Amino acid sequence: MAKVSIEKRILSENDRIAIENRKTFADAGVLVLNIISSPGSGKTTLLEATLDRIARELAVLVIEGDVSTERDMDRVRARGAGGIQINTGGGCHLSAKMIREVLGELDLESADIVFIENVGNLICPSTYDLGEDVRLVLLSATEGDDKPMKYPSIFHEASLAILNKTDLLPHLIYDTEKVMKEIAVLNPNCEILRLSALQGEGMDTWIDWLREKLAAKRGEQTSGARRGT
């Protein structure tokens, strides 16, 4: 019981800080996505491919979460993104407090989109709200089609699931329809996109999705401001 009580207090404090983060992001008018996946699913490759398509149009910041090194941060900086690295030193996830501690180092007022690349893990990050608008779970066709039912928590919480590396499907035993049905069972409101970040298939749909979400967020804020006057 003591362990459960401590975990509840930790999550309660995390949720309190996440609310503060969400307000900070909303005040700046930025769209924030928390990307969660197992290691090697292609989070950084997706960010690189995304930046190649929108860096001249939209200002993007990236918060990179990793156990150690700045290798992924170096990759996205080379594509035109600003941002900051958070090394957890062994921790399996980012927390709202970690995000809060680096926000003062980011120029949110000049940004359009903030991507948070969480530590590679489908379990721990699913529990921690960071203050994001979109919790995105990234799947890879190379990691097997059993992930939704093996790791249901992240699919319950995600608002978007992306199946990456679809260019490899002809060479794999992977039941795409089963995966999509299982995600729908776990979370009927979770949107699903399919793409290949490396080859470019489906990337236009993803970029359009981002633009629409950004426009919708800023439209909601404008409407809210008008209602408040």
Image (cartoon, rainbow, N blue to C red):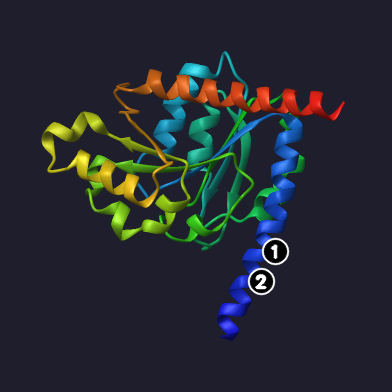
Q: Amino acid at mark 1?
A: Glu
Q: Quadrant of residue 84?
A: top right
Dot 1: element: helix
Cβ atoms at labels 1 and 2 below 8 Å apart: yes
Task: Report crowding for label 1: few under 14, some 14 to 19, many 20 or more residues within 10 A (C-alpha).
Answer: few
Left or right of 77: which side holds 21? right
Outermost residue toward the front in this view: 227
User: For the C terminus, which image quadrant?
Assistant: top right
The answer to whether 191 appears left or right of 22 in the picture is left
- At mark 2, the secondary structure is helix
Which corner quadrant of the image does residue 181 belong to?
top left
Find the residue positioned furthest to the bottom: 1
Question: Whole-percent x and y of residue 122?
Answer: 40, 55
Most foreground residue, 137 or 184? 184
Residue found farthest to the top: 56
Determine if residue 79 is in view. Answer: no
Q: Residue at x 12, y 35 (%)?
A: 171
Residue at position x 71%, y 55% in the image: 17
135 sits to left or right of 16: left
In percent of the image, x 31 and y 35: which residue is there? 164
Q: Give the camera-side residue of 37 and 161.
A: 161
| Image location of residue 155, percent across then percent down | 40, 50
Quadrant of the rendered structure where residue 31 is?
top right
Which residue occupies 25% across, 48% down? 143
User: Callout 2 environment at 10 Å: few (<14), some (14 to 19), or many (20+)?
Assistant: few
The kind of residue on which mark 2 rests is Arg
| Residue 196, percent from left and from top | 30, 28
The disc placed on residue 148 is: none
Q: Is residue 148 above or below residue 62?
A: below
Residue at numbered disc 1: 13
> Residue 89: where, in percent of width, then height?
55, 61
Residue 9 got which mark? 2
